[in-house]
Amino acid sequence: MGHKRSLDNANNNVDGDQECSTNPIDQQPSAKKMKTSKKMNGSIQLEDTIEDVSVKKEENEENVEIVPRTRRDMIQLPYDQKLKFVSIIAQPMAGKKLAKKLFKLMRKASKQSRKEQLRIGLKEVQLRIRKGERGIIVFAGDVTPIEIMCHLPGICESKDLPYIYVPFRTDISSAIGVRRPALMVLIKTHSEYQDLYDECETKIRELMLEFLKTI
């Protein structure tokens, strides 16, 4: 009897140990499952983080405004970006296509004879206008202070001279082949580039007429 009771107690203890050891295992996921779950959660968090960073980067790129600091920056800046830095009085402003034609015209005039076909800078242009010389006048739109040249458009209108603005002084200087930024240039007519000259003049007068209607 005693031996039987001891066997029964031993069996009960074994059963109890099995129940105790079985229940915690059933309640907790396996080590493999936990590792996989953790890895999946980690990848999801990482993907979310990468997506958030890329979105913020795109938003920052859209909000960043390129500010030209050197002559090279000014020349390489896209035309539509250049228009953000021009003076409020720079009207009428040449569009991108007209500006390209004007720069081409300047290069042709400079190649023909820079000294004879071009009048460069504020003093020389004013002097030549007073002496009665005629031509297309191109002003830089980033001149400061504007008081030094704000009277010239009125003089051009009174003398029936076509005038137009381009964004930067460096645009003019690079087109005519000089290193020093040019506030303005007067382009005289010549048979070697007469067709291009006439095309530019016609378009400039159209823009001048549209601008004067808004005043």
Image (tube, grey):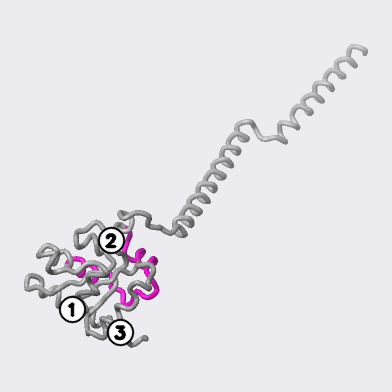
Query: Disc 3 vs disc 2: Cβ atoms closer than 8 Å?
Result: no
- Nearer to us of marks 3 and 1 is 1
Q: Which mark is residue 181?
A: 2
Helix, strand or loop status at disc 3: helix
24 part of magenta stretch: no
**First reached walking from the N terminus: tag 2 or tag 1:** 1
Q: Which mark is residue 208?
A: none
| Range shown magenta | 77-104
Please name the residue shown 38% across and 65% down the image. 85
Helix, strand or loop status at disc 2: loop
**What whole-number distance in Å separates the C-alpha atoms at marks 3 and 2?**
29 Å
Query: Disc 3 vs disc 1: Cβ atoms closer than 8 Å?
Result: no
User: Dot 2, crowdedness within 10 Å: few (<14), some or many (≥20)?
Assistant: some
**Which residue in the structure is indicated by mark 1?**
131
The answer to whether 160 appears left or right of 21 in the picture is left
User: Dot 1, crowdedness within 10 Å: few (<14), some or many (≥20)?
Assistant: few
Q: Quadrant of residue 89?
A: bottom left
Q: Residue furthest bottom?
A: 213
Please name the residue shown 17% across and 80% down the image. 132
**Which residue in the structure is indicated by mark 3?**
210
Give residue 209's position: percent from left, percent from top.
28, 85
- Residue type marked 2: Pro
Decide which of 63, 9 is in the foreground and name it: 63
**What whole-number distance in Å separates the C-alpha atoms at marks 3 and 1?**
28 Å
**First reached walking from the N terminus: tag 3 or tag 1:** 1
**First reached walking from the N terminus: tag 3 or tag 2:** 2
